[in-house]
Amino acid sequence: MEMRTDKFMIYVFSAIMLGGMVACSSDDPETDTGNGNGNGGNAEAPYVWGAEGAIKTCDHLLFNDDKTENAKGTVIGNGDQEFIFKGTQTLSKGTYLMKGWIYVGTGSVLTIEPGTVIKGDKDTQAALIVEPGGKLIAEGTKDAPIVFTSEQPKGQRKPGDWGGLIICGNAKNNQGVLNQQIEGGPRTKHGGNDDADNSGILRYVRVEFAGYPFQKDKEINGITFGSVGSGTTIDHLQVSYSNDDSYEWFGGNVNCKYLVAYNGWDDEFDTDNGFSGKVQYCLSIRDPRIADTSQSNGFESDNCGDASLIEPYTTAVFSNVTFIGPLGRDANFVNNESYITGGSFNPNNGSALGKFQSAMQIRRSSRLNCFNSVAVGYPVGLIIDGEKGNTVEMAKAGNIKLENIWFAGMTVVGSDANKVYDDVLYDAVNKQIIDAGQESYSSTFFKTQKGNKVLTDVNELKFKDGRNIGVNYMPDADSPVLTAASFNDALLSSGFETVEYIGAFGTDDNWLDGWTNFDPNNTDY
């Protein structure tokens, strides 16, 4: 919105506003209007300030780089480490620099127009945090996605250059109402009893080079969901080069579609604390040179950290996922520290490198379910980890379903414990082999589930791009995955599209076109 230039009108308007509220203005009496970035709603209003404890609040988001107020500025936040936005505002299409931890407070709504680029400041570990009761409307388009990325120059971007995107709501988790602080450091607590809660819209959004480690082993993920409800719309997201997990859900029941996890550091899809949403069409691609010290997985799933049998259980249902592990990218991959160096993307920020582990690790009393999927080239296909909780008992009782899933090019099909790479029957509690002559329970479980298959050769899948070629994992017209799906299970009776293929793609539905970016380090922003 264009600022009025008539000073008399500005003075009249300000006087009216001051009759009903206390405003704090910039040290500069003249508002700068010169950069062309509108704010879509309250550009003419004075900035209204307050505080929650030691953190300043304001009904405007935009500032100049010197921290002065400018409703058409290009800096998000006033430069403090923590800043609470309390209002309704639209960021017009443009390029912005976000500084510090920006909280979208309860009752506030932040709308971001398609084509907008938001760069995260490295020095302040910038992050955008939507608190319970707040909303983020980030609705990009196929031709004009919204991008959250590093402020670093082209060619110099690394995982962990900034914080990340955190969405919190009032749906259920198994830790209580507003009792669980979100992972990564921000103040926000999440969780309630409204499973239909609406935290906004994320559509056609990319998040790149996030995950700043504010403390050792305490990074913000690429995108974190804390107790987000089913009223929230989530589809067409790409997280690239996250310094922790690409996506992590803590409780909630938000449904998601069309997710891309590209070259993350730790796990790709991490589910915890009673997450019960439905997720369809996911692509995970790993850089063979990047893995976390905790052992990197495609799925990592817990009911809770101490494996307690508390409700709601983690019962998320995934369908049509394609996992491309390190052996799916490089036939010469070696799972050791001499190979896994981080390559040119090692940020040297304290994040420790480690090994790759499994396509799927289900542990700590989780009841994760997955159908109609393909996983390629991990050291281990499946770990049903019995070290803590009753995960193995839940699998035996039929409360974990992994059906119509094909493994290809795995080193071993299964293992029964974290950091155990042998397909042998293993006692995870006492950390000892039960019988070296028998395959793991995890392997036996996988092979006896409906429609599952183990392929030795990755090429049997007949994807368009093989190893060391590209990122086109659509199947050829004669690929066997095209007719391998089944949606007969009751868990798939609602909330899922019925298709004939397993994995993320059919032959003619490349939903990656137009909005994704697999070379963000060399993109001009």
Image (cartoon, grey):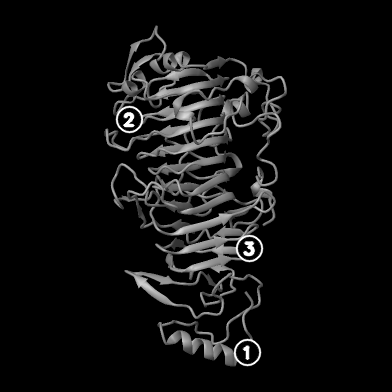
Quickly name the residue at label 2. Answer: 365
Give the mark nearest the N terminus, 3 or 1.
1
Give the mark nearest the N terminus, 2 or 1.
1
At label 3, the amino acid type is Thr
Vertical comparison of 392 with 92: above or below? above
Q: Secondary structure at mark 1?
A: loop
Q: Secondary structure at mark 3?
A: strand
| Cβ atoms at labels 3 and 1 below 8 Å apart | no
Viewer-nearest residue: 340 or 128: 128
Residue 264 in view, yes or no: no
Quickly name the residue at label 3. Answer: 95
| Rendering coords of residue 482 (x, y %) | 65, 23
* Distance between the alpha carbons at the discs numbered 3 and 2: 44 Å
| Rendering coords of residue 229 (x, y %) | 42, 47
Q: Nearest to the eye among marks 3 and 1: give it.
A: 1
Quickly name the residue at label 1. Answer: 6
Total labels: the figure holds 3
* Distance between the alpha carbons at the discs numbered 3 and 1: 28 Å
Q: Quadrant of residue 407?
A: top right
* Left or right of 4, for residue 361: left
| Cβ atoms at labels 2 and 1 below 8 Å apart | no
Q: Farthest top residue? A: 437
* Distance between the alpha carbons at the discs numbered 2 and 1: 65 Å
In the rendered image, the quadrant that contains the C terminus is bottom right
Give the mark nearest the N terminus, 3 or 2.
3
Q: Secondary structure at mark 2?
A: loop
At label 2, the amino acid type is Ser
At label 1, the amino acid type is Asp
Local crowd size for mark 1, using a 10 Å CA cut-off: few (<14), some (14–19), many (≥20): few
| Rendering coords of residue 333 (x, y %) | 58, 26
